[in-house]
């Protein structure tokens, strides 16, 4: 399981130019069942994505194709989390 942090860079003002493509990239991740949850980091710092399924390398390749990453609007950090304890609703993340 991973958390992808997408923190705005100095090019944040260019976000509107690439927002439609970024949203399409997010939608594809949701549709393919890779992205479980997508949201904003409060205070306008960027976004975060909860991910399950791919290898680290597969996820890195996917993140590198995000138009916001390509155009240096965000800096991406992938945090690898090994689930140990969860609620029953999220037990599938421990597999």
Image (cartoon, rainbow, N blue to C red):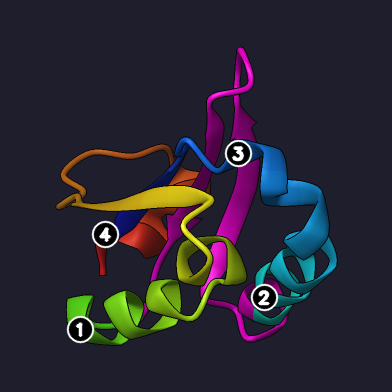
Query: Which of pointers 3 and 2 indicates the residue nearer the eye?
Result: 3
Query: Mark 2 = which residue?
Result: 25
Q: Quadrant of residue 56?
A: bottom left
Query: Which of pointers 1 and 4 indicates the residue nearer the eye?
Result: 1
Which type of secondary structure does the marked residue at label 4 adopt?
Answer: helix
Instruction: Work out how far the residue at label 2 is from the one at label 4, CA to CA, in angstroms.
Output: 26 Å
The quarter of the picture where the N terminus appears is bottom left
Query: Mark 4 = which residue?
Result: 94
Residue 23 place in picture, x, y as percent: 77, 65
| Mark 1 Cα-neighbour bin, 10 Å: few <14, some 14–19, many ≥20 | few
Residue at left 53%, top 48%? 89
Residue 15 place in picture, x, y as percent: 71, 49
Query: Which of pointers 1 and 3 indicates the residue nearer the eye?
Result: 3
Q: Is residue 44 magenta?
A: yes
Residue at left 67%, top 68%? 26
Q: Is residue 30 magenta?
A: yes
Dot 2 or dot 1, earlier in sequence: 2
């Amino acid at each position: 399981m991973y958390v992808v942090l997408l923190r705005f860079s100095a090019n944040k003002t260019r976000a509107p130019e690439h927002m439609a493509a970024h949203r399409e990239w997010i939608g594809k991740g949701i549709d393919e069942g890779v992205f479980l949850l997508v949201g904003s980091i409060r205070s306008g710092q960027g976004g975060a994505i909860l991910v399950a399924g791919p290898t680290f390398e597969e996820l890195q390749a996917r993140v590198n194709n995000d138009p916001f990453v390509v155009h240096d609007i965000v800096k991406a950090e992938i945090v690898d989390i090994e689930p140990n304890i969860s609620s029953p609703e999220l037990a599938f993340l421990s597999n």
